[in-house]
Image: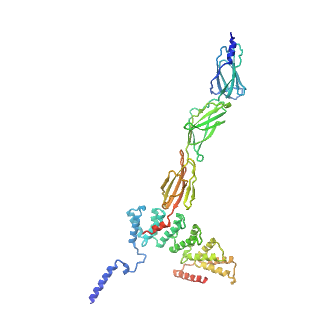
Amino acid sequence: MNNMIGALIAILFTFGLSHAAPDDGLLYDKLTDPRFCDTADEFKNTYQFLIKQNDLGFTEPQAVKGALKVAKNCTGAYERFSQVFRVLQKSGVDKKKTFEVALEYSGFDNERAKNFYVLFQKLFLENYLDIDFSTAYRISHELSKDYKGDPAKLRDDFVKIVKYCTDEKEFSLGKQLCMDLALRLTKYTELYPNGLYDEFRKFMVYIQTNKHLGFNLREALNLSIRVLSKGPKASRNFRQTIDFALNKGEKLNLPELQAFQLALIISDYSFDPTKKKPDEPALAADAKSEKKDDKKLK
Amino acid sequence: MQNPKKKMIKSLNKFLLFLVTLTLTQVHAQSKGADLKRLSSVELQWEDTPGAFMYEVEIFNSKNKRLKKFVSKTSLFKFKSTSGKIKIRGRILDAYGKKGLWSEIIETTVPPEDIKFPQGDTKPIEAKANNTTLKGNVKLDWPEGIQAKQYAVKVYDKDNKVVLEKTVSTLFVNFDLDIGTYQYSITPIGNDFILGKEIMSPRKIEIGSAQLPDERFEVVRGPNNNIQIKMPKKPGLEIYGELEYAHHMAEDWAPVLEYKPFTEAVWSPETKLKPGRYRVGFWVRRTGWVDSGKFKHEFVIKPTEAEIADTTSQP
């Protein structure tokens, strides 16, 4: 009996092994460790892609060499490479340079590469910001491979700010103005755990609707940039100070201009760059407390 | 029988006076002062009259002012005179000094002497055409003509057709001429507007071609914000052009299209140009001229979002 049980276990084990081989997931945890790369797929896809690019003029050994370089950049390298390559190729960039830049971006993470090919289109294409190639190319690099923060957050902020700024129902400003605004604001994206777009929009609405402030759009935008540059708490501090300083029930009860000046000073104090950046959990906690504060204000 | 003396005098009334030659030798009539008076040489042949011992001749100008009175031993009178219309009369003197009757007054003209260009100087008079006027400026000069008060200058083209004509009182004239080869002549004009002989200068005029001036090509935006270039309109000028392509981040320009010539009033980019950098160049051409400099304008053709999306969605 024991022998029979032992044989059955052996058969089941063998059967299980033979069927588990094609799908490792049945036996092992899915390999999410970024150190382990699907290099075969990356090589094959890249090689097939390069060999089809007739105008690139790659010989087979060159295509192999190129595919090897891409495959070396681990999982997702082909996707990053091909996306950047296609956008630049379609825009009329020199083939050799296209290959070089695409290869470079295959070596970055997905979000960073995505920043390049998404933001480049937003900057360069006529139906978006329609700026010249050199500027679009330079800014795209600055906002992707040269960006030190979270590329996805930056991309999200940039795209949303531009859309909000150019939207006919919103600011309906010129493309150049909107690009400048987006570039100036996104310098501070990293200070905001979830990006600054929502805070920007909320603060703009506050400035434009506050009967005491009465700024035109340009002044409102400049004030927004100044306040938001001081971090996620600055706009709340500004609003609270205005409310406090203008409150007739308070002893302070300043005139509007003085109240505004005081609010500016207080909001400027919202960011202390000499202090160390807290850990991620602490940042998240801050964000939560800020949301509560916002609710209180409402 | 008729008295031979009377017959002689009578015949003098009908004497034949004709100009044999007018030479243009430079004559310096000596005067008491240091001035030299340059006069035209005149020779008059009088009909030999039997019994004539000498001839007395009087010369008047057109205003009947006597210019000269002299006695000649022969019937060939040689004298110096100002140019213009002159009047002459003469009578014979016999061996006894008896004078016959004055002849009728004969009117004739004394032209100024021929212009004498320096021999052997055949070096062309050269000029380059001006970029703005499209003509070359030349200064033509010539030696002073004896008894010439003015000079008629004629410029002939290669087909011997007079292209310019001017009368001047100076010994030079400036002309603006189109590109080509020319010759010129000088005709001296004396008193009473009596023309001398037209003399061709041994020196040719050569106006060399020059580069046409750069034309202004106005770049404007069309109805769909597309680029447009307005062509200049000038008679005799043809517009040539070319369209070149370069990738972004590359410097090599490759020809795309040529316009030989471009005949439309306005140029705009051809549709369906592939994305990249373009450079359109235009210049003007005219026969006999060096082409103008190129007007160049660069522009960029961008892909549409749909075109990018189409490629990015590919596997």
Farthest-out residue, bottom:
A1
Farthest-out residue, top:
B1
Of residue B198 and residue A284, the one placed in the foreground of this image is: B198
Which residue is drawn at the image coordinates 55% and 77% (left, top)?
A192
The total of numbered circles placed on residues is 0
Q: In which quadrant of the rendered view does residue A14 lie?
A: bottom left
Q: Horizontally, is A64 left or right of B201 in the view?
A: left
Residue B158 locus on image (x, y percent): 55, 38
Q: Horizontally, is A158 left or right of B2 in the view?
A: left
Q: Is residue A4 above or below residue A39?
A: below
Q: Is residue A161 above or below residue B279?
A: below
Q: In which quadrant of the rendered view does residue A33 lie?
A: bottom left
Q: Is residue A214 above or below residue B135?
A: below
Q: Is residue B116 above or below residue A206?
A: above
Quarter of the image that includes the C terminus of chain B: bottom left
Which residue is drawn at the image coordinates 45% and 65% (left, top)?
A99
Q: Horizontally, is B91 left or right of B161 in the view?
A: right
For residue A273, say whether it is visible.
no
Quarter of the image that includes the N terminus of chain B: top right
Residue A112 locus on image (x, y percent): 48, 72
Q: In which quadrant of the rendered view does residue B182 lie?
A: top right
Report the colour scheme: rainbow
Residue B136 locus on image (x, y percent): 59, 43
For residue A100, say whether it is visible.
yes
Residue A252 locus on image (x, y percent): 69, 82
